[in-house]
Image: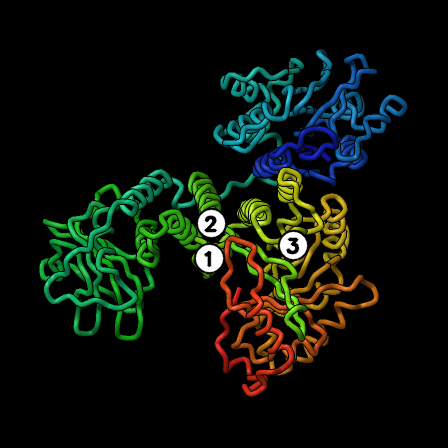
Amino acid sequence: MANQRLAVMVGVNDAGPHPRLRFAERDAEALRDQLELEGFETCLLIGAEATAAEIKATLRQAVMRSDTSDVLVVYFAGHTVTPEWSRGTDTYLVTPDLDESALSENPDSGLRMAFLERDVLEFFAGPAVLLVDAAGDAHVAPQAGYSALTSYQPDAASREDPVIQHGVLTAHILATLRRRPGVTFGSLVLAVREQGLTPQVVNPPWGDGIVLAGPAGQPRTPASLPLANPMDAAAGDILHLISRLTHHARMPRHAAPRSAGSRAEAGVAAPSRVEYLRAATDAHSTALLEYTPNGFQTIDSSKRFDLDVIRPLLRFPAGADWFGHTVHDDHRTVLCVPLRHAEGRSLLLALVDPATDLLGLGQPLAKILETIWRTDFAASPDEAEVEVLTALRDAFGRLPVPLYEHCFELYRRVMESYCVVFQPVVTLGKTARRVGVHSYEALARRSPSDQRAPVAMLRLAEVWGDRFVVERDKVILRMALRAYAQAHAEGPWAQPKPVSVNVAVRSLLSDAYVEVLRTMIAELGIDPETVTLEISEQDPIEPRRGEQWAEAPHAYFHNRLAAIARDVGVAFAVDDFGEGYASLSRMAELPLTQIKVDRAILHHPLAAKELSLVMDTARYAGHAPRVVIVEGVDNESPLTLREIYEQRIRHVQGYITRQPAGPTLSTISPETSEYIAALVRGDDEHRDTLITRADDIPLQRGA
């Protein structure tokens, strides 16, 4: 090969006995993405895949194919260690498979700096660059035949910056490559030193000219650059506008007087909504207008709004399939934002003379205002902000980094504002003394008195991707386990009752989530065997685009759960079987202790047979018997408790206890126990127990 630019990136967060790093693997991924834009052919090895043998084989393959016109970049983020027996002359890059106790007898069993120098960097036919951002120490040959920019921090905390979420050296390398049109190794070193860093630098006389960003020779594939987002230049103004909206939302709200002749439309406009938007946008006046073939009418308006004055400026083209527009004359400017369009009738938000700086936002401003009209900033400013930013992302494809990071912090804050309540799983019996509490499920709520799950906000994480999903589940896990430990300490049970917490598939694949799980169980002194993680039915079990799993998806995930169970000691359940991705194969092939059946199955015409199939699968000889729990059972369920019991099911969950979920671990009263036992016996058979067709009954999940 000739005129090739090659890059091998290695990132390792977990390195045996060493403190876990948070951003090493993220560092490697970010540098991979940047160098690909510069025309490098890249190889990324992170996490468990970054074994010494795999790294050595990859590097040696690059060396053996090299030409004098080629360039090689080797990057490592993680821990390094210099064994005492080497007397400070040899350093190892710590990989997940490194056994430090074996190095003295077999020094080549790990990834030695000596191997990189002797067999890779100095042996490569063309220029070679080594970049290391590590926690630990190292020995680098001062007179090497390659260029090196390395930083060895004494501990993991000093290597990483939690604000920028990168290693410090890596962050400045990335910033330099992104901001400067042409970067050589020499200019990269200068840029890093300008930031006050003092990395170790090894550079032969010709090393300064190695090109890392920009054209170099005739690369096989030209570098590509992402298209600019129209919001990039407006990110600061958008954050400023959202800040103004939040500020006004938190101020005391006073209903604005309605203008003469206006009428309220139920479910569309609160009396003070237009006044709030007027204050937040510093407009002269605002109004909600209705457009029909007869022209415009005022639905609601702020003070000083006069439809007759601006009527000549207004227009509303059929379809309203645009963001909005501004119109003006010599005296005023009107911003028109369509809110809803239907046959013969449309709604329009009109702002008269809003702040001039806002008008420069263009389409993003219209999308923000349209979303605000559908939210309630006063009730929950943080949630409303997240919805606004999500709408912008949907409309424009992606958000600039400042807006994305702002949304991430807001979303975390929203999750942390929630609380946890507990709903009991009831053990069934034909006598009251056999009815009792089997376990509890921890449920996220906006407040202890709010029985509605914040479903839309919880599921919004999937829109944003794995980072939001994992953060959501980490926050809820912390809250749930803390609340459970406190409720149990104050509750009626001498022996701990099990608790279950919902979790996404992607969170269980995240080492960060598992580390929170392990830490919280140890910190709170919880018996891990009492904790069950309910795997969401919303998530497929499959690799993301670009991921490589060594086994078939269910086998890979099975082994992942088994490893967590061995390491931490918790159990797993399938949540909402019968909905989403909660299929028979998932139920049969994963190491589960519980199967939770979705309420919707109770409304199927063949509900009894489906429950019988679930029980047969749960008792499949290849597994230990699993507990089957039917969710959402209440007096509206077309399948009676007697019929559920006859299918060998002994546990249900829902409002059958006639008690709302609460922050305490409540027991079941004797009266309720007798009531449930009577239902199991069939004492209520006077009511119609025929299974009704699913489309005849409105589904309202009890949990």
Q: Nearer the viewer, residue 365 or 78?
A: 78
Amino acid on which disc 1 is placed:
Pro
What residue would you read off at disc 1? 454
- Crowding at dot 1, Cα within 10 Å, few <14 / some 14-19 / many 20+, comes out as some
Asked if 187 appears above or below 549 in the picture, the reply is above
Question: Residue at the spot x=58%, y=60% of the render?
Answer: 667
Q: Nearer the viewer, mark 1 or mark 2?
A: 2
Between disc 1 and disc 2, whose residue precedes?
2
Label 3 with label 1: CB-CB less than 8 Å: no
Residue 308, x across and y down, in percent? 9, 62
Amino acid on which disc 3 is placed:
Lys
Question: Quarter holding the N terminus?
Answer: top right
SS label for mark 1: loop
Q: Residue lying farthest right?
A: 105
Examine the rendering and report whether any part of residue 466 can be seen: no
In which quadrant of the rendered view does residue 619 lie? bottom right
Between disc 3 and disc 1, whose residue precedes?
1
Q: Nearer the viewer, residue 166 or 673?
A: 673
What residue would you read off at disc 3? 497
Question: Residue at the spot x=80%, y=12% of the render?
Answer: 87
Label 1 with label 2: CB-CB less than 8 Å: yes
Q: CA distance from mark 1 to mark 2?
A: 9 Å
Residue 466, x across and y down, in percent? 57, 48
The mark found on residue 418 in the picture is: 2
Examine the rendering and report whether any part of residue 309 can be seen: yes
Q: Nearer the viewer, mark 3 or mark 1?
A: 3
SS label for mark 3: loop
